[in-house]
Amino acid sequence: MSQFGLTAYVADFIHKTRYDDVPAEVARLGKASILDALGCALAGAHTPTVDILRRYVQPFEGVTGPTASVLGGGAKLPPRFAALINGTAMHVDDYDDTQQAATGKFQGIHPTAAVLSALLAAGESCGASGIDVLLAYQIGAELACKLFDATHPNHILNGYHSTGTCGLLSAAAAVAKLYRLPPDAIRNCLGIAASQAAGLSENFGTMMKPFHAGRSGETGIVAADLTRMGFTAAASILESPRGFFQAEGGGWEPERIVDRLGQPWAFVDRGIWLKPWPTGSLSHPAMTLMLSLVETHDIKPQDIARITIKTSENISRTLLHHRPQTELEAKFSLEFCVAALAVDRKLGLKSFTDEFVRRPDVQDLIGRVQYDTFGEAEGRAAGHTIVTSFVDLALKDGRQVGGKLDYGKGSKTNPMTQAEIEDKFRDCAGFAGWPADKTERAIATVNRLEREADVRTLLACLT
């Protein structure tokens, strides 16, 4: 680490890293996450959450100065507001990528939405190349994961949502890289961003949760733009006794970030998981297991007397809606997710409506779910991961079937294939009514993005 402290070490990594420093597998996985997030944005662009934000920023459409595109629509906005809309759209269905916390810690972070929304808006406004956007994205995603890893567990336990805290810093870092800021300016940019880092997990299951991602993307642009204009901030904001880590968690864990940026990259370390279902990823091991059980044993909803699920206490606190009535609450309800899979054997974007959540057969099966938990000490003693989940079905004919799963579909252990990722993009685009020819061009353009001279070629497929 630099003799000048953690903020300087981070700034040096941002400044010095070149595209040739990114391993081929990391580059491939990064493009997969970008395609995944763009599909999420198309699907999320017409949700009530995003519609409200679009109405809020409508007065800024057509203003003079640099503009950027709203994905899934035709509006042009100042880059900061395009990032706000697009980042929210990427996260609104909770379908975007996630890095789970290390064992012994809590929750995770959505690294792509904040970073990519900021980069697309800033990159379009300045005509950045595909390779410039890809490099800045890799730096931002890497920093998001390592900053999150370094936070004290109290960061989460005190109620912060890491996508709104660490995600905001990583968006600022990515835009600073895109703008080719020198190290001292990058430190300043991080100082501006850190004073605005926020987002409370009590808002999970409401419109505010995806707003955290959009606001992070917006503020990343604001921090970099203000830095270029000479606005000043503290140069050691990360490690300072009154800085980011201390204020938002009571300390940090140096061994998780010092000399760890790019060593190894987060994409190939624990991995950044893509989601097969539009729900909180902590539910996915139990959902993967539930779907396997009902398909393997051909179980119908009427066959089930009781569903017993068991996860860590932290998962139960995060998936906090145990009798959901709205589609936003259902995204953070493990009871709904396993019940819906038993009813439909699938759980896609069309499953998340208030009407489906309130359907009598779904609510009836939710009522037959018993949710048990294990404590942190029990989990450590048993060697569980932070997402280890148990599902047991008591059937009316007296049979019992069940099992345990440590990781879900989409994780590094059980990843989505490239074909599955592209099909997910097509499904999201189809859900949004997006033209098939633009859909296929977008897939092809992302796959060759390092060869595109201007990122606007990609945006033309998405607007």
Image (spheres, rainbow, N blue to C red):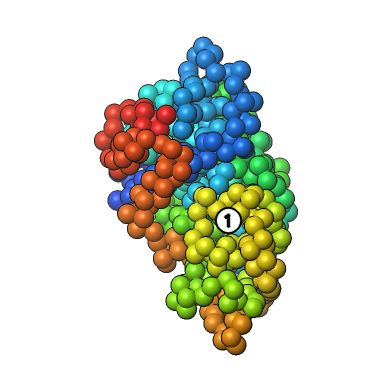
Residue placed at 58% from the left, 56% from the top?
Answer: 280
Pinpoint residue 1: horizontal percent, then vertical percent.
49, 49
Q: Percent from the top left, x then y, of residue 220?
A: 55, 33
Front-most of 226 and 122? Answer: 122
Is residue 134 among the parts visible in the rendering? yes
Residue 429 in the image: x percent, y percent?
A: 42, 41
Decide: few, some or many residues near mark 1? Use Cα within 10 Å; few <14, some 14-19, many ≥20. Answer: many
Q: In this view, does 391 lie to the left or right of 198?
A: left
* Residue 80 sits in quarter: top right
Q: Is residue 353 above or below residue 255?
A: above
Secondary structure beneath label 1: loop
Where does residue 13 sit, x and y in percent of width and height?
A: 44, 43
Relative horizontal placement of residue 428, taking residue 300 as reference (left or right): left
Residue, far bottom = 398
Front residue of 320 and 213: 320
What residue appears at the point 35 percent right and 49 percent down from the top-left corner? 422
Q: Is residue 19 above or below residue 359?
A: above
Q: Residue furthest top?
A: 64
Residue at the location (51% across, 50% down)? 349
* Residue 216 appears anywhere in the view: no
Residue at 70%, 62% (x, y): give it: 322
Residue labelled with disc 1 = 280
- The correct choice, above or below, for 387 with respect to 131 in the image is below
Check the picture and name the quadrant holding the C terminus. top left
